[in-house]
Image: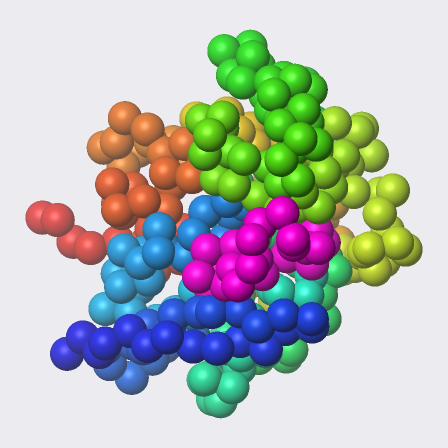
Amino acid sequence: MEQAAQTISIPAEGARLVGTWYPASASPRASLVLHGATGVPQRFYRHFAAWAAERGISVLTYDYRDFGASQTRPMRDSQANFADWAVHDQTAALDTLAKLAPTGPLWVLGHSLGGLGLPFQTLPDRVTRITTVGAGIGHYTDHPWSYRPKVLAFWFALGPVATALAGYMPGKRLLLGADLPAGVYWQWRRWCTRRDFFASDIGVTLPEPNYTIDGKDIRICVAADDVVVPPVAVRRYAEAFAPSGAEFRIFAPADYGLHTLKHIEVLSKESAPVWADLLELPQPDLT
């Protein structure tokens, strides 16, 4: 029997986040925290979370500080940066998951930015499985030419000018995604326009990364048609985790009877056929 989702308060360093807990409909096989992508509110993941809960996996979703349901002040007043979301907020959400599910294995699913905090966190022993999708060490020149004009506008034209004028990234008005705190946008921009990605922030806003994570099943995944964080960028991230024995996986839409999977859409309800493989669950028998 499906259980009702519950609103959860998540204490984080310097903030309080709003999350949603989707209890498994039966005795849970695992409990999962879903770290979301930049600019994607947690409500987007409700279909995936409900799907997983029906299959015995409890799920915690949440919004990063000063965004979505966790926004408590005008966006221009936010002091949040990309590292706050990737390190402090993701750590707090995993800690809360461990309290909501005091027994049993814990799983982590990181979508885009949601997967980039992995090397900067100390993971509890109960975490047995880590999956990222669309998380990569990217550079704006990795994008296919068809997507390049939008990227150049976001990083070098409309994006920086509008953010400087508004005091936050007015993505909605620019038709370039969600509104974001200025600190999130500027740090994200720096990572994606420098060849060393986040290296310049290590020791400043980021701790030393650890790419050797023992005793965990780590899978670094991407959709074959992802133009936002293309497979080449995700492969770089997977190669960084080689000491951990991470598996690199590309999902082709046609293998699941789909026309597209893309970057954000891979976790939309239309992409449900790929979710079992994403979580390494048995595919339903369609015969």
Count the numbered circles shown. Answer: 0
* Rendered location of residue 76, percent (x, y): 63, 47
| Residue at 46% in and 30% down | 173
Q: Is residue 202 left or right of residue 281?
A: right
* Rendered location of residue 198, percent (x, y): 78, 42
81 over 173 or under it: above or below: below
* Rendered location of residue 14, percent (x, y): 69, 71
Residue 89 position by quadrant: bottom right
Residue 140 magenta: no
101 over 133 or under it: above or below: below
Residue 65 position by quadrant: bottom right
* Rendered location of residue 78, percent (x, y): 65, 54
Q: Is residue 51 left or right of residue 44?
A: left
| Residue at 84% in and 43% down | 199
Instruction: Please say which color scheme the image uses.
Output: rainbow
**Near-viewer residue (138 or 251):** 138
Tell me if I can see residue 95 in this picture.
yes
**Near-viewer residue (252 or 96):** 96
Which stretch did the figure color magenta? 62-86
53 over 239 or under it: above or below: below
| Residue at 27% in and 37% down | 256
The quarter of the picture where the N terminus appears is: bottom left
